[in-house]
Image: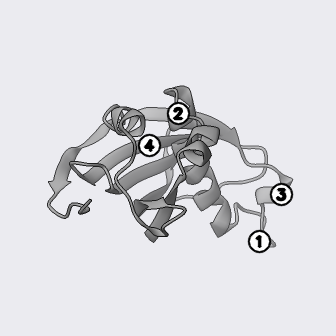
Amino acid sequence: MYTTSTKATWAHIDANGHLRNTAYSEFATHARLQFFDDHGFPPKELAANNIGPVMTREELLYYREVHMMENLKVSCQLSKATKDYSRFQFVQYIFKENGKKAAKITLEGLWLNLQLRKTAIPPQALIDVCAQIPKTEDFEWLDKQVRS
């Protein structure tokens, strides 16, 4: 399981004194982008290839409150994907310092050709990085492929 670290700061806290709901999504997004960057495909490569990730569905389950200045770990695993990696589903967890789960984020998405504004098969270099994303124990391949 890939994980990255972050901290709940003043800007992430809501009026109730705990992590605001959108911050969970932001931390999950950062972990995914950090994985690609750590594996040789930084955001500038996405732009250079005219491709970008698009979220089609996101579900957040909250388990425990997170408060300001808490150190967190954010995991990143692939739970479903087409064999060409044009469509995907991630399962991510946010862990508190004590190792307990604070939230689960399930995200479905696709790669978008930014010029054609259509679902795209990623370039081979990105496919190679996608193949390295740790997979959940119940990972499954999806049947739907993008037609070239």
Does residue 100 lie above or below 121 as drawn? above
Q: Which mark is residue 41?
A: 2
| Left or right of residue 14, residue 126 in this image | left
CA separation in Å, label 3 and label 4: 23 Å
Name the amino acid, label 2: Phe
Return the x and y of residue 9 as percentages of the image width and height: 80, 49
Q: Nearer the viewer, mark 3 or mark 1?
A: 3
Return the x and y of residue 7 as percentages of the image width and height: 72, 42
Q: Dot 4: what SS?
A: strand
CA separation in Å, label 3 and label 2: 28 Å
Quadrant of the image containing the N terminus: top left
Q: Are marks 4 and 1 in contact (CB under 8 Å)?
A: no
CA separation in Å, label 1 and label 2: 38 Å
Return the x and y of residue 55 as percentages of the image width and height: 48, 66
Q: Nearer the viewer, mark 2 or mark 4?
A: 2
Q: Which residue is mark 4?
A: 76
- Label located before the other in sequence (3 or 1): 3
Q: In this rendering, does residue 98 appear at all? A: no
- Label located before the other in sequence (3 or 4): 3
Name the amino acid, label 4: Cys
- Label located before the other in sequence (1 or 2): 1
